[in-house]
Image: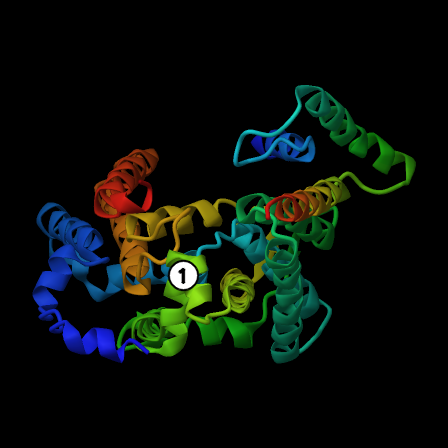
Amino acid sequence: MQLNIIAAVILAGISLAGGRGNFWMLLLSVGFLSTIPTSLVFFGLSSDTQSIFQGLILVIAVAIDGFRARKGTP
Amino acid sequence: MTDTAASTLPPAPHHPWRELLTGSVASISFTFIAVVAVGWFWVGPKFLSFGNISIMGTFLIVPLIVGAFSGMALLSGVVDLSIGSMVGFSSALFALLISLGWDPASAAAVTLVACLCFGSINAIAIVGFGAEPIAATLGMLVALRGIAWVLLGSQGAIFAFNIDIFNLVSTTLFGLPLFFLLAILLTAIAALIVTKTRIGRHVQAVGGDDKAAARAGISGRKVRVAALLRSSFGAGLGGIVYAAQLGSAARATGVGLDFQVYAALIIGGYSILRGGVGNPIGGALGLLAVAGVSNILDLKAISPYYVNIIVGLLLLAAVLLDRLRGGDAYE
């Protein structure tokens, strides 16, 4: 459960280092992560695959976040 | 390069005993001795009997292997949270391949390569893109858990008992499990690499201050990629040993192992957010001390739930001690 929450926070673009983020994006990201189980059912995948997608989305989101932060700093 | 600086300053006198009191393994040495002393006086000589140590050792093989490798990653300033799931994934894949009739050596090789692939995804995200290590490996933790569950199928467990592997991992030498001794040897080798070789100094330099290390010509990227790959390799190795010990893999395999290992490593003098401190010997002593506490409680028939309280208090003490010792790093 706490992993889901942290995933949602990071996906919302709220920086773990603090000082950057937007609460409305948190609403969006929670909504997005909650649609994953439902959409997997539509694709006919078992619910075990849910965490694979959540995890990979988290890794990609964090990588993009890090890339943006790196480009932002001189 | 540092020759001129070193020749002007007299070399600091080296006292091995003072090092033991103030060095990186000081607090854990005291904790370890205290645990052994409590065990000796409270439980009696049977606490240090070969039978009891080999029981503890059997359960410590996987944490020691995983801890030796992921401790090196902590030392270079990256924390790999995915090791617990990596152990679960590796044991699931290994058990699956064994149950499909592969021979153990090639199954182990394929499992290790798969673990290294996931480790390199970690490395690409963290070093290549500059992702936060905690967050990226947290994602990998979730993803690998899912992959392990998919591999295990709807039953949630794979039985892959292979008598040859089981005999191999339960071989004893001098009354102690052979793999426990090998894990201790691995820790000693890791400690030698960290303290005595150029590679180890590079790892410590990058963990301590990567900008200063870069100015000294050490590639922080290379060191961190190597650290992440090593940590996933260690977790893969641990998972294989786990599957071989149990003769099966289940959904719960490896759950909580990451917190067990990291709690012990922090008690042993490592720091999660600050690289460059800690020593593999300290990490191994931390694991031994925690195992000793739970063993004492088991032998005195005290509820094992108290272990968590004691480990939590030790962790708090270790964190405070780390703050006292390395306070300047935060100022």
Q: Residue at x 59, y 66 (%)?
A: B161
B167 with respect to B281 (left or right):
right
Vertical relation: B262 (above or below) B5: above
B29 with respect to B226 (left or right):
left
Q: Position of residue A21 (x, y in %)?
A: 63, 27
The residue closer to the viewer here, A49 or A34, is A34
Q: Type of residue at label 1?
A: Ala
Q: Position of residue B327 (x, y in %)?
A: 26, 43
Q: Position of residue B30 (x, y in %)?
A: 15, 52
Q: Residue at x 23, y 57 (%)?
A: B24
Whether residue B202 is visible, yes or no, is yes
Q: Which of the image's four quarters has the C terminus of chain B?
A: top left
Q: Regarding mark 1 in the picture, which secondary structure is present there?
A: helix
Q: Residue at x 51, y 69 (%)?
A: B219
B119 with respect to B205 (left or right):
right
Quadrant of the image occupied by residue B207: bottom left
Vertical relation: B86 (above or below) B233: above
Q: Residues within 10 Å of mark 1 (few under 14, many from 20)?
A: few
Whether residue B76 is visible, yes or no, is no
B251 with respect to B52 (left or right):
right
Vertical relation: A74 (above or below) B3: above
Chain identity of mark 1: B
Q: Which residue is mark 1?
A: B212
How many discs appear? 1
